[in-house]
Image (cartoon, rainbow, N blue to C red):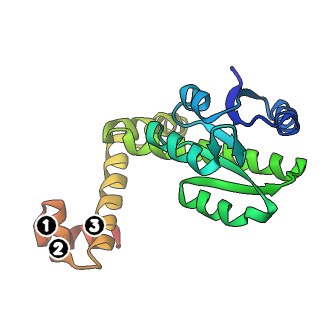
């Protein structure tokens, strides 16, 4: 599996060396750019990006604004000088995930980059879940469920699955309508008597 890529935007040798060491330890490939213009050309969606506070053609805020116009869901880590902490707050408002005050400590940056990787992974999983169709969702869940049912044996798979799905759907509708059976019946497209019977059947 190829190493995940991190984009570093800095022209400071000590920063480049520090990020490179940390990236090696986390199995990350570092793509280095020294200014905003070249960084924007090298950027891509869903990427972890470290932005230094001062660059030859602007500051970190200008860099974020340019990156935000072209990319979706990048994970930004911004470095700011100790006398410019307010710059870090402004960076957070411009979609930065974290900011770190310089001089940057090795362990602090390592933990921050690792958190950004975990956040990226979680965001990807959430996006996959919400972009999949209902059929894809159930197929994914049933793929692991069916082998377990086969091991147990003597279970009517169809009836079991339909009952579980129906119970979950009715319970969700009741929760979303604040327990109002009339509204729940409209939401589900069922009549009120059917809803009442299902509630008794599933003890909801």
User: Can the viewer see residue 182 in this picture?
Assistant: yes
Quadrant position of residue 84: bottom right
Kindly indicate whether the residue at mark 3 contacts the one at mark 2 (C-beta within 8 angstroms): no
Q: Farthest residue to the front: give it.
A: 57
Cα gap from disc 2 to disc 3, whole angstroms: 8 Å
Cα gap from disc 2 to disc 1, whole angstroms: 5 Å
Quadrant position of residue 194: bottom left
Kindly indicate whether the residue at mark 1 contacts the one at mark 2 (C-beta within 8 angstroms): yes
| Of pointers 2 and 3, the one earlier in the residue sequence | 3
Question: Which quadrant holds the C terminus?
Answer: bottom left
What is the x, y in percent for residue 14? 88, 38
Is 196 situated above or below 12?
below
| Of pointers 1 and 3, the one earlier in the residue sequence | 3
* Secondary structure beneath label 1: helix
Seen from the viewer's position, the closer of residues 192 and 99 is 99
- Tag on residue 49? none
Seen from the viewer's position, the closer of residues 37 and 149 is 37
- Tag on residue 183? 2
For image coordinates 44% across by 41% down, the residue present is 69
Is 179 situated above or below 131?
below
For image coordinates 47% across by 33% down, the residue present is 143
- Tag on residue 186? 1
Seen from the viewer's position, the closer of residues 18 and 203 is 18
Cα gap from disc 1 to disc 3, whole angstroms: 10 Å
For image coordinates 60% across by 45% down, the residue present is 75
What is the x, y in percent for residue 92? 60, 59
Residue linked to disc 3: 173
* Secondary structure beneath label 3: helix
Q: Farthest residue to the left: give it.
A: 191
Residue 169 as seen in the image, left or right of residue 180: right
């Amino acid at each position: 599996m190829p190493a995940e890529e991190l984009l570093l935007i800095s022209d400071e040798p000590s920063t480049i060396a520090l990020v490179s060491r940390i990236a090696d330890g986390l199995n990350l490939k570092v793509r280095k750019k020294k200014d905003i213009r070249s960084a924007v050309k090298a950027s891509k969606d869903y990427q972890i990006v470290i932005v230094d506070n001062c660059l030859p053609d602007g500051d970190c805020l200008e860099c974020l604004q340019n990156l935000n116009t072209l990319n979706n869901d990048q994970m930004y880590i911004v470095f700011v000088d100790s006398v410019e902490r307010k710059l870090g707050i402004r960076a957070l408002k411009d979609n930065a995930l974290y900011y770190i005050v310089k001089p940057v400590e090795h362990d602090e940056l390592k933990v921050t980059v690792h958190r950004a990787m975990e956040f990226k992974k979680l965001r990807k999983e959430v996006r996959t879940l919400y972009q999949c169709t209902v059929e894809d969702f159930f197929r994914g869940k049933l793929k692991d469920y069916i082998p377990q049912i086969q091991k147990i044996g003597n279970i009517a798979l169809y009836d079991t699955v339909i009952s579980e799905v129906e119970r979950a759907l009715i319970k969700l509708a009741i929760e979303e309508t604040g327990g109002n059976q009339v509204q729940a019946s409209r939401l589900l497209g069922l009549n009120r008597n059917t809803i009442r019977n299902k509630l008794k059947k599933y003890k909801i």
